[in-house]
Amino acid sequence: MHAAEDNLVKIQEDRSTQKLSDLSVRIGLQMAGWKPQTPSQRVVEYFSMDFEFGSNPETSSTFGFTKAGRDFFVHDSRGYGHMWKEMAKEFSNRIRLNAGKLPICV
């Protein structure tokens, strides 16, 4: 599967350079030599495609297709929410929670 994904990236880059139309990932994988025949190959494909990208190869576009990269995990002891709290500081003074609505004058 990994070799087919590498080949698919090359196929898509070539098609993009030549300004050819889009393909489904299914067709691209077949062009790259991946044709799952056994249940174990279908499981590998499911994990590599459906699970990793959130859609199946028949409905996924090769435009922007890249091989699955590294997974990123938050190792900050303050937790995942800390990042969002820091980003929200800039505008949090404009957010009113649990407050009544103000009348709208027309």
Image: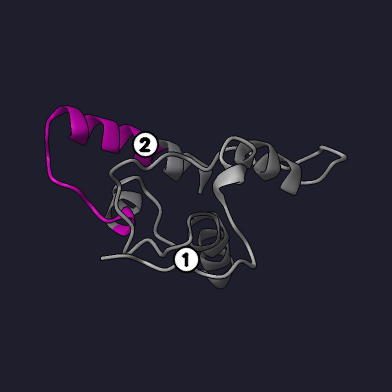
Residue at x 37% of width, y 61% of height: 57
Q: Which residue is mark 1?
A: 102
Residue at x 28% of width, y 38% of height: 12
Name the side, left or right, on which 75 lies relative to 102. Answer: right
Q: Residue furthest right?
A: 77
Q: Nearer the viewer, residue 15 or 100?
A: 100
Sequence-wise first label, 2 or 1: 2
Tag 2 secondary structure = helix
- Quadrant for residue 30, please give it: bottom left
Task: Mark yes or no: residue 72 visible.
Answer: no
- Image position, residue 42 (x, y; %): 51, 67
Amino acid tagged 2: Val
User: Label 2 crowding class (10 Å Cα cut-off): few <14, some 14-19, many 20+?
Assistant: many
First to last magenta residue range? 7-26
Q: Nearer the viewer, mark 2 or mark 1?
A: 1
Amino acid tagged 1: Leu
86 part of magenta stretch: no
Q: Quadrant of the C terminus?
A: bottom left
